[in-house]
Image (spheres, rainbow, N blue to C red):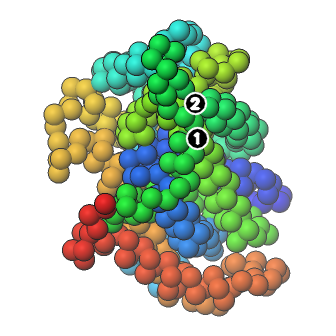
Amino acid sequence: MAGIGSSGRDGFTSKFGIIAAAAGSAVGLGNIWRFPYVAGDNGGGAFLLFYLLFIVVIGVPVMLSEFTIGRRAQANPFGAFMKLKRGKPFVLVGIMGIVAAFFILAFYSTVAGWTLEYVYLSVSDAFNGKSGGEISEMFNGFYTSTWGPLSWQLIFMILTAFIVFAGVQKGIEKYTKILMPMLLVIILVLCVSSVSLGENVDPETGKVIGSSWDGLKFLFYPDFSKINAEAILAALGQAFFSLSIGMGVLITYGSYIGKDNNLTSTAVQVSFADTLVAVLAGVAIFPAVYHFGMSPEAGPGLVFKVLPNIFQAMPGGYIFAILFFLLLTIAALTSSISVLEVVVASMVEELKMKRVPATVIAASAITVFGVLCTMAFGELSSFKIFGKNLFDLFEFTASNIFLPLGGLLIVIYLGWFMGKKEVLAEISNEGTIKARLFGVILFIVRFIAPVAIAFVFLNGLGVFGFEATGG
Ligand code: TRP
């Protein structure tokens, strides 16, 4: 059967299946919820520029390295480094990956719970006739409460666990192929609606409240006075988070990819699709933010406060809102299953557990962390470590510390320890396809990517002590 890995492990059946599953992992809340809010917090255009730069010089190489390692070893991140020559010390990637998976899924399920609430609110037409201020207050009232957010989070975790039981092929491939293109279409419609909002003039005073053009300017015009070392680290963290790299998700997925797939082009295509969705989400959000006179620095609530306003202003907004939040939840699911899959695959293959109990145990343990993240905005909001509540702390440590460190180890392994011949054999499908850019790829993986990650990482944590003050 085409696409089944040589060792007979569960595999992806078609070329589109692989891309759909990897893109399904990459495209999620990271693009639509996180990208706009992190870009908004870090100055917009200049942040976007660093983000795009990091996708090209770091993201694609790390993604290709993960695919290569996973398919070579036919194993989860732990097993992979145990099996591969000179890989043992790199098992650290697997260990950090599990910790990162816990942190990521904890806050991810909180936000996915919010999206579920927004599916419900859209269906019940709750935004109808509400002012921008009232819509913001609706979000504030909801996410600081206890039982609503917790119930949705639990539902989301159960859905995630349920899909992971079903196994790779049936669980992942079937849904992503149709639904992700649909989501893309809706986002395009939102972009058009948001940009065409135009200028917003107060009918009573005649004063201009804001214009959608200023939103485009915010997103695309790089104002370097707004950038500093921390913002650059945030761009790196966002690139890693959005591409699902640095914690071994794509090592695990690589092990399911057929031997005849061109890994280099898969990595390029997935990265391109993911980046496109993020930038389009920005185009959908920021013009509306400016039109309605809101602040781009609204933090994690940004899209939930902005989008209902666009839906209200557009024809057919009721239906679009429902479809959008539903598809966003599904996009979140195809990402969350990939995170849980790493933990489960590691437990099944390394601890010889059965798939179902492994899934139940992993999902339950993660839910405990998830509950803490959700409550970080309510009951536990005064509980802070390093000035961050638990949600922010998990989000920061996972994206800006664990993922870049994992990515650093991954490129160092591929570039310096795996052996050039072995890397070439895997990337060229044992010599059956030409790896024309191999020299360039190897150079980036050996030198550019590790140096760039290390520099941005240490600089962002203030190690060099010349943190720019940023205008
Ligand atoms: N990339 C996903 C998103 O943008 C989230 C995600 C899935 C992820 N798997 C991951 C992030 C692995 C980091 C590592 O929504």
Q: Quadrant of residue 185?
A: top right
Q: Nearer the viewer, residue 189 or 10?
A: 189
Q: Is mark 2 within 8 Å of ligand 1?
A: no
Badge 1 marks a residue whose secondary structure is helix
Image position, residue 335 (x, y; %): 56, 45
Q: Is residue 242 left or right of residue 437?
A: left
Image position, residue 289 (x, y; %): 49, 34
Please state which amino acid type lies under the numbered disc 1: Trp
Q: Quadrant of residue 445?
A: bottom right
N-terminal of the two: label 2 or label 1?
2
Image position, residue 145 (x, y; %): 30, 20
Residue beneath disc 1: 213
Within-10-Å neighbours for mark 1: few <14, some 14–19, many 20+: many
Badge 2 marks a residue whose secondary structure is strand
Which residue, as the protein is rendered here, is positioned at the far front?
Answer: 206
Residue beneath disc 2: 199
Q: Nearer the viewer, residue 33 or 78?
A: 33
Contact? badges 2 and 1 (CB < 8 Å): yes
Quarter in which the N terminus is drawn: bottom right
Residue located at (71% from left, 45% from top):
173
Q: Is residue 204 left or right of residue 318?
A: left
Residue located at (26% from left, 42% from top):
390
Residue located at (46% from left, 24% from top):
207
Residue located at (65% from left, 85% from top):
440
Please state which amino acid type lies under the numbered disc 2: Glu
Image position, residue 163 (x, y; %): 59, 37
**Residue 155 in view, yes or no:** no
> Between marks 2 and 1, how big is the CA–CA gap?
8 Å
Quarter in which the C terminus is drawn: bottom left
